[in-house]
Amino acid sequence: MSYINPSPGVSGAQVTLTVYRLSKVADATGLAIPGLQNITVNAANDVFTWTQLDSTGKKQIATTSTNSLAMNLVVDEASFFGTGSGTTAAGKGVFGLSKEKTKVEFELSLGDNDDGSATKVISGFGYITGLAPTVSADSPVWVSPITITVTGDYTVADAS
């Protein structure tokens, strides 16, 4: 299970990211992404701007949103390359889902209670992109950025 302890000294608080190949219904177990170092939830509305002759200020209106999850992870061989068996997210791994351009369903569970339980879950559909594993003398483990480009809107719900 992947985890981030967002509250120093509170070992129970966890954030987990699970991806499902195609959908949660088609891939009931999913793949919990381990070794997350950070997560950024991007929800950037585009803005259309115009000027009018009867106004000294520009007019603006929000249009469609560009959504994505950006994160860094320590590469775990089994989850990054998959188990090689079946067509599930765990079988394909993060690299396989990206390489095959597979649409995934994701759930980001915000484990913000002291006991590790979540109060909110951000979910949606998207594509895994931006993989670029690196290793160096200063960081002797493989680390990779990863982005899930969201197609459509986020869904925010109470955790079950």
Image (cartoon, rainbow, N blue to C red):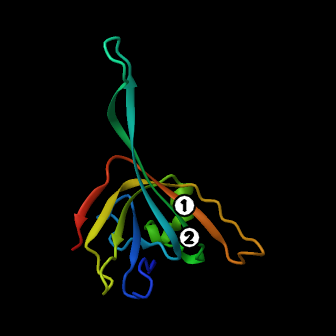
- Quarter of the picture holding the C terminus: bottom left
Q: CA distance from mark 2 to mark 1?
A: 7 Å
Work out whether residue 117 or residue 142 is closer to the camera in this orientation and state it: 117
Contact (CB < 8 A) between labels 2 and 1? yes
Indicate left or right for 33 with 156 as reference: right
- State the image coordinates of residue 140 (x, y, percent, origin top left): 72, 78
* Kind of residue at disc 1: Ile
Rendered image: mark on residue 127: none
Residue 61, can we see it?
A: yes
Question: Considering only order in the chain, which callout, 1 or 2, is on the residue closer to the N terminus?
Answer: 2
The residue that appears at 39% across and 87% down in the rendered structure is: 10
Seen from this angle, which residue lies furthest front?
56
- Determine whether the residue tagged by mark 1 lies in a helix, strand or loop: strand
The residue labelled by disc 1 is 146
The residue labelled by disc 2 is 73
Residue 44 higher or lower than 84, as above or below: above
* Kind of residue at disc 2: Leu
